[in-house]
Every structure is written in structure tokens, then in C-alpha cells.
Amino acid sequence: MIAHLISIGNELLMGDTLNTNASWLGQFLHERGVQVTQVYTITDAPEQIKSTIQMALDKADLVISTGGLGPTLDDVTKKSIAEMFGVGMRHEPSVEEHIKDIFRRRNLPYSPSNHAQALLPENAELLFNSSGTAPGMLFKEQNSLLVVLPGVPHEMKHLMTTQVAPRLQEWGALNSLETRYLKIAGIGESHLADFWLHNIEASLNEFTDLAFLPSPGQVSLRLTGRGLSRKEAESRVDGLRLKIQQQLGDLIYSDEKEGTLDRALGQILSQLGYRLATAESCTGGLMGHLLTESPGSSAYVQGGIIAYDNAVKMNQLGVDASVLEQKGAVCPEVALKMAKVVAERLGVECGISSTGVAGPGGGSPEKPVGTVWLGFYTPAEHFAVRAEFSHSRSFNKLRSVITSFEILRRCLLGMDELPYNLQKVYPASVKRMDQPQKGSADTSTRGDLLHS
């Protein structure tokens, strides 16, 4: 079944209200095997409403509109649909009594304008709305179905869940559909598609889909399988998942839709018996905030120091004043020192640090806006990496955190490749070991900074 969605309301086009209804409906229908192929967002103008609904009915099996069913002058959806179908209006006593009861319970006078909400087009089937005053409506016209719902999100969701969803099977909408998610960080969407998953396309067919869902520093892969039964759909999507897992291996940090990178890193720290401390300059505490978003993070997060001012870097983290004077705060020496000292002072095995030019000002030809040094200290390694992001301050902070989490995750797993082909920079003294050993973290002499 093909569906089109129509969101009605000037407030959506002007940006006064965020259109969450369309995204919720898209996901709701997708999970039930209904394919949404187009979404319209239109004004409250009657002619626009009529022409858009007619166009959607000509193309789709199921059309769902939201908005414009309230009692005020700008709520013209119902009247416009009646005109489109060339029918009059009928009175629904059950709806009017329901509205009056709501007013009585709230000790409010019954508003005459609400009387119009009990009027429905003559060819409409009532979708009774027990969660609000605006009823939904169902029309069976032109070999298509038109579902008209209120724009208030909780009312729309109530009607979709209780009245529309149970009838999708009756309308022949459903094939069984199963969805899986795989999450990757530190590889761009195009790089992932071109170099890691270029041969997966041959595995896709009318029964399986693969979608790339990028976000800052990360990509979620949504895998979908369809079948005449749930078992058949599961078999198809799990076969696709296995092929991708074989390709990507430990680059996948989660196979859960709600899985997060901080949680994946926390699981590895817990398994190794390590705890983590953070030393943050340009990220301003965002590392610590995201690390502690997951319940139970106290098992592996010790604490942190926000060393935004150079005085804090010197006094709390032992950064040499001469280094700051000669090279500035955005350099590998500062990142290395911050990561090591925060781990030592908080008595933990691992430390990470950030120092950079978050922007939008403050850059130079040598250190443009978006330049960030990230430091890492573990029982096996002590190194820093240099990354360059964007001119957006908030984006630079988030990418710095995501990149640091993914680098540490990979290092603790013993993976050689770093995100975005970043290179490690080692300090003058460090002990490299083939296998991580808890509690050992220093110090054979290696000369000046060198790049791997």
C-alpha cells in the first residue's frame, strides 16, 4: 500500500510549529508495511486543501491529512473536503455530547463555535476522538482511502493507534516487515557506502532495503526485510544484517536502534575494569555530559576537569607555561599532558582531553577554526590526534566528543585504524605494549614528538 501524508497549517510553513506529525506517521506506517512516498505541507487555504487532497487520492492508496479540524476561523479542512466531494454536512450527537462533557468536567461554559465540530461531511465515517474535541474522519472514495485527523499530536496518535492501525490489515495494507539498526562512528556516509559496503547493493532486492541515516560523526544503517510472514521478514533482514556485520566487524558500535556511542564505550571500559576521566577545554564539559547520559555510568566515569582558561590547564593539569607561551593551548603537547594528568590525579586508568579552536572566531592560518587536538591516555598507549572540523562552534564541540569516544573505543578494542584516517602523535616518553595491562602507564624515552 502506497500512502501520502498531508500536513495542513500556516503555522507549519511559517516555522511557528514544528511538524512532528509527519515524521511520527512516516515511522508508524513504515513499521506496519505501508510505504509513504510523499509528504505535503500546505496552507489553510481551501483551494490548496482541495487540490492537494485530490492529487494525493489520484496517486496513493491511502491519504492521511492532519490539521485544520479545530473550532476557529482558520480551521477549514472539514468544510473544504465536503466541498471537494460535493456533499453537505450532518450532525453527530455523540460528538457534541462528548464535547459538552469535556466542558462540564473542566467547569467551562460551552462555546458555540464548538458546535461546528460535531458537524461531519455526509459521506464521512466517524473516527471518534475520546482524547479531544475534534473527531477524525474516514472517506472511501475513488478506490482510495482518505483519513482526516486533528493536528494536535497526542490526539492524532491516539486515533492512529486505536482506530486506524487495527484497520490496516482489513484494507490489505500489511506485509510483515522487520527492521534492524547498525551504528557506526568515525566514517562518513559516502566513504562507508563506497569503500566498505559497495558490494552490498547486489544483496538488495524488492524484499530488502538498506538506508544510510547520517548524523554528526556517525551513521545509522537501517535494514528492512519484508515478507508474507514475520518469520520470512526476519529471515531476510537478518541475512542482510549478517553480511554487513561480516564486512564491518568491530566498526559497528551498536546493533540497537537506541544504542549510543557513550554506552558502547562504557561497556568496553566496564569489561576491562577501567575507569575514565576527562580534561576538557574547547568542549566545555560536553564529554562529561554525554558520558553520564546513560544510567549506570558511575561504574566507569570517575569525573573530569573543565580547563577552559590556561590558568586551569597549568594549575590543575600541570601544563607547562612555556609550552602555552611558545605553542599556544591548541597543540599536541597540551592535549597529551591534559589526558595523562587528569587520569593520574583522579586515579583512573584512562584519560581523554580536548583543546581546540571551536570558533566562530579565533582561528589562524596555522590553526584555522575547527582545529582540535584530542589527547588519550590508557594502560597501553599515550597519544594525541589532530582533527579539523567546521566553522560551526556547536558542531565542532559535538564532533570533537564523538571522535574522541570512537578513538578511545577502537583503541581499547585493539583496532589499528583510527576514524577519518587520523594519525597518532606520541609524546617524548611513552611505553608501548602489545597488550593492554591495567595499571601500567609510563615511561620509556622516545625522543621528540613523532607521527605514526
Image: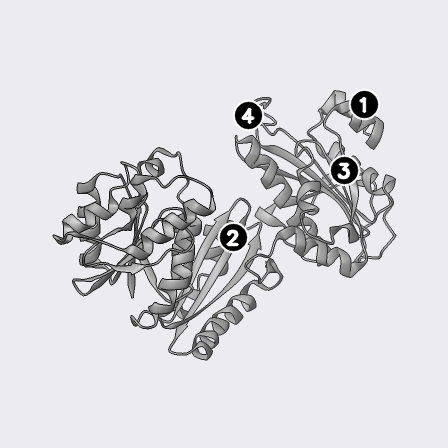
* Residue at 39% across, 53% down: 156
Residue at mark 4 to residue at mark 3: CA–CA distance: 25 Å
Q: Nearer the viewer, mark 4 or mark 3?
A: 4
Q: Nearer the viewer, mark 1 or mark 2?
A: 2
Q: Give the residue at mark 4.
A: 360
Q: Nearest the camera: 306 or 190? A: 306
Q: Give the residue at mark 2.
A: 219
Residue at mark 2 to residue at mark 4: CA–CA distance: 26 Å
* Residue at 57% across, 63% down: 255
Q: Earlier in the sequence, mark 4 or mark 1?
A: 1
Residue count near mark 3 (Cα–Cα under 10 Å), binned few <14, some 14–19, many ≥20: many
Q: Give the residue at mark 3.
A: 336
Task: Give yes or no for contact between labels 4 and 3 (Cβ–Cβ under 8 Å).
Answer: no
Q: Earlier in the sequence, mark 1 or mark 2?
A: 2
Q: Earlier in the sequence, mark 2 or mark 4?
A: 2
Tell me the amino acid under the disc marked 2: Val
Residue at mark 3 to residue at mark 2: CA–CA distance: 29 Å
Tell me the amino acid under the disc marked 3: Leu
Task: Give yes or no for contact between labels 1 and 3 (Cβ–Cβ under 8 Å).
Answer: no
Tell me the amino acid under the disc marked 4: Pro
